Amino acid sequence: MIEDTRPLEDVQGRRDERGIDIDQAGVRDLRYPITVLDRARGEQQTVARLSMSVGLPYRFKGTHMSRFVEVIEAHRGEVTMRTLPAILRELRERLDAESARVEAKFPYFLEREAPVSGRKALLDYDCFFLGESIGPDEGFVLGVSVPVTSLCPCSKAISDYGAHNQRGYVNIEVRPRRAVGEEPELVWIEELVEVGERSGSAPVYPLLKRPDERHVTMQAYDNPVFVEDIVRNVAEELRGDARISWFRVEAVNQESIHNHNAFAEIGWTRPE
Amino acid sequence: MIEDTRPLEDVQGRRDERGIDIDQAGVRDLRYPITVLDRARGEQQTVARLSMSVGLPYRFKGTHMSRFVEVIEAHRGEVTMRTLPAILRELRERLDAESARVEAKFPYFLEREAPVSGRKALLDYDCFFLGESIGPDEGFVLGVSVPVTSLCPCSKAISDYGAHNQRGYVNIEVRPRRAVGEEPELVWIEELVEVGERSGSAPVYPLLKRPDERHVTMQAYDNPVFVEDIVRNVAEELRGDARISWFRVEAVNQESIHNHNAFAEIGWTRPE
Amino acid sequence: MIEDTRPLEDVQGRRDERGIDIDQAGVRDLRYPITVLDRARGEQQTVARLSMSVGLPYRFKGTHMSRFVEVIEAHRGEVTMRTLPAILRELRERLDAESARVEAKFPYFLEREAPVSGRKALLDYDCFFLGESIGPDEGFVLGVSVPVTSLCPCSKAISDYGAHNQRGYVNIEVRPRRAVGEEPELVWIEELVEVGERSGSAPVYPLLKRPDERHVTMQAYDNPVFVEDIVRNVAEELRGDARISWFRVEAVNQESIHNHNAFAEIGWTRPE
Amino acid sequence: MIEDTRPLEDVQGRRDERGIDIDQAGVRDLRYPITVLDRARGEQQTVARLSMSVGLPYRFKGTHMSRFVEVIEAHRGEVTMRTLPAILRELRERLDAESARVEAKFPYFLEREAPVSGRKALLDYDCFFLGESIGPDEGFVLGVSVPVTSLCPCSKAISDYGAHNQRGYVNIEVRPRRAVGEEPELVWIEELVEVGERSGSAPVYPLLKRPDERHVTMQAYDNPVFVEDIVRNVAEELRGDARISWFRVEAVNQESIHNHNAFAEIGWTRPE
């Protein structure tokens, strides 16, 4: 009885009379397995949380939400900086829209080698891709959150021994430069991880044996940094990288002597 | 032994040689009890999650994080749209900074009366205040997240009976207009709650007896809205409110027929 | 200089004199890619959040945390109900412990077909494996969280039209029966998903076209359930499944007329 | 039209024929302002997340969810270890149930004084109350999460200088002893905070000036502890406290050299 096939009205396609454009209409918190590029292994399978939307002109009542899922289902094979332009194009076509936006957040894994023993295991990094297409313009952002050890320069300087230290996160977002009509410059997650790790007192590792623990303990003590130092270290490197046209870097320390966090942030756009 | 009183170096005050300004340096995820303004009862005590920061000129190595806590401790009595200007001023003075930023996120409670039985109980709303002071400029934003019921117009139109509905959140952020040298116009949390509730299919309530449940079930069925309708409803009201110079409204539906959410968003700045 | 190779003391192996056994000592919030069994496709790659621990006898000061990561790194290929016994055995051997515990939480994806159009896409389910080994005993639990639509029987009965409905989650945990010396009975994630979906008013889907939306809207209206009905529906099915020796089922509704959730729970152990 | 007053059927009160008792049916994630006992100031206002449920006999289809909110609304004045017995009693009476359960999670604030400068500010602790009433039996649990600094004994012992340290949380749950027919022994949140703080390398503070930072840095270096040491320190104290009939203590370290956490746990019941 409920399977009848009379034509069903396209309610979303009804005319809206209020004359108000909508910047974004779409789906959010859609979890999907995706494949991303991996510098060492070619590709890597992970699980993303997706947000996809389009701009909706004032005359339409609603957008067609199921088409977002259809587009991502068709691209299950790969959601990367390389395929985002095609995904944005399809969203605009399928949804008859003048703008589209896709954001994919996912954990990414890299094999890290302990500094003395050489023991290997995987470390997880929270990453995201963001692609936006508005009229003739396209923009892409790659974000990576890099865990590091940070050791407080003040605590070291004023104490007879010891120094408080903690896990911190260096959150780096970059917009690769892009010549008109070309794909954006490729910036690897792996490169941003390395920039982030160099900015702290020491990297963190998934697996450390005793000689490794001795190494990182002393490495951190030898390289004290404030959150302010971390963001400046990253800013200095990224300004010098001609592939990058914009970045935002944030450092957040899980302060070991407080129950709140310290943070610092720098945003930067390459002058024309 | 560790209580000696030799003068301790001000490491944060050291000179930094990299020539890089920092946009924000401060503390985050600091939980603190605060008092906010309550239209009906004068004031309300709640618990906030605070983020406080200042801009740091290129010549200083770091900021003095403990002073943020000192400033908020001194204002334990009230953190509201009325006191934010003073808090920002103190942060700039105490930290010798040319900009400051304070964000307070907190739950706010309003007594809601069931529509038929008149039974009363408290409903919670996630809110935030944001204040920014940069050079001679100050900006303030008030944000309120309003839970509503939304019933799908498409589901209702194409089905012989029933219609899928769900809890949704209408997230409204407004920047009150502000004449030079004066406090910003006062916009009450209560007013934004009312705007948000009017935009959905029906309000949600903390306490409903059977006649109330009958009422809201039928009210929602009589007023179907997409997320797109919700943000347009709010946009239309806020554009007409001369006290508001900017807003952003987002509607998010916890779709009852999917495991992902639908959303729509409109941002707007009042033309000069 | 910091690479010297003098022997480093095994501090964890020091004797503790307080005479207090520790129930669990280990690592938590370790994110790792894992492979799990997939009934339709053989296996599925996903990302897990792992907790691994051992019991620590009173005489030892600490456990050797790096060995947990070594064991999981060695099993990167597969963490499933089939391999948990071997992982637990290795943890006990490597850490010289009389008990071990492993918990893996991960999203699992199944292709779901829309009920009328037949359109396919992936739906995500939060799952977990738990394995415990204490002396000669071993125990295993499989958990699956199944999203469903639930439509309120009271709202339907007392209203002239419409009925409030919402997304709910049916959280099912089962302990498969296990003959002495044998592997536990295999219960598939897919089977628990089906039990969960049958217990609600209608399944949720990743992708629905208009005829599908009409179908599920009317299906839900035709099958109203309280959270109490959901857990009883699941309990009735699982009691009748001889492979299951224990279960706990919980239903949680994101009430569309409230800003809080409704829930119900039943736990059950098969009588000897 | 929708305000008519015909009697509405009590659908929840319908008979269920499956013969299955439900352990818990109720509401969850209900946010409410509550007042709790404060040793220094008499009482403290905070915001709780509540879970309330009753057991439902096999013969009833559902429970009456609105009554949970009515009971908590009536007790807005105070939800504490002292009032939980009355709340449980009312839930059982109002809902005609043989068991009831209430859980309230809330942040609690204590003024902490910096160890050298004496500067004061508030520190937040996640706490919970749990009350259960089943037939003639009642049980109560108080939980407190205490942030501490922990400094690694292994890292200190094997390194020429420095030692990794981090913020950790000591999660203590106690069941106060209770003579038949009497209220449970009063255990203060403040007491458990002190036990937790003594168990780590150093307390954490909301506000530290330079002499304070020097103090806690060296205090932590002088008192290295593993998570295993922390839980044994707490266990030793609580076993010696005759007011406590059961406890569970868990220590979790936000390891500064890893991206995962270390933890240890001990549960204990006082022998009769």
Image (cartoon, coloured by chain):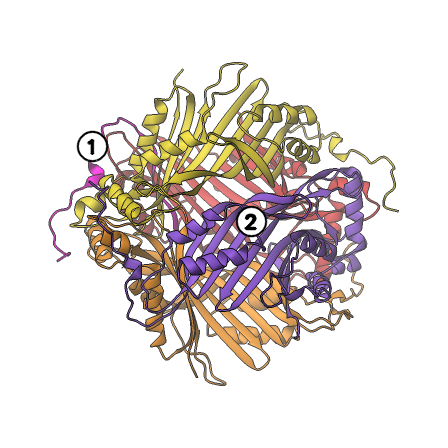
Chain colours: A orange, B purple, C red, D yellow
Whether residue A258 is visible: yes
Magenta highlight range: C1-30
Q: In the rendered view of the protein, which quadrant contains the N terminus of chain C?
A: bottom left
Whether residue D22 is visible: no
Q: Is residue C21 shown in magenta?
A: yes
Please state the chain letter of the residue tagged with numbered disc 2 in the rendered image: B
Q: Name the residue type under label 2.
A: Phe
Residue D99 x, y percent position in the rendering: 61, 25
Q: Is residue D196 above or below residue C200?
A: above
Location of mark 1 (residue): C15
Name the mark nearer the viewer: 1 or 2. Answer: 2
Position of A164 compared to A184: left or right?
left
Position of D203 compared to C178: left or right?
left
Please state the chain letter of the residue tagged with numbered disc 1 in the rendered image: C
The rendered magenta stretch, by its main secondary structure, is classed as loop
Q: Residue at x 54, y 24 (%)?
A: D82
Residue D22 x, y percent position in the rendering: 62, 30
Location of mark 2 (residue): B106
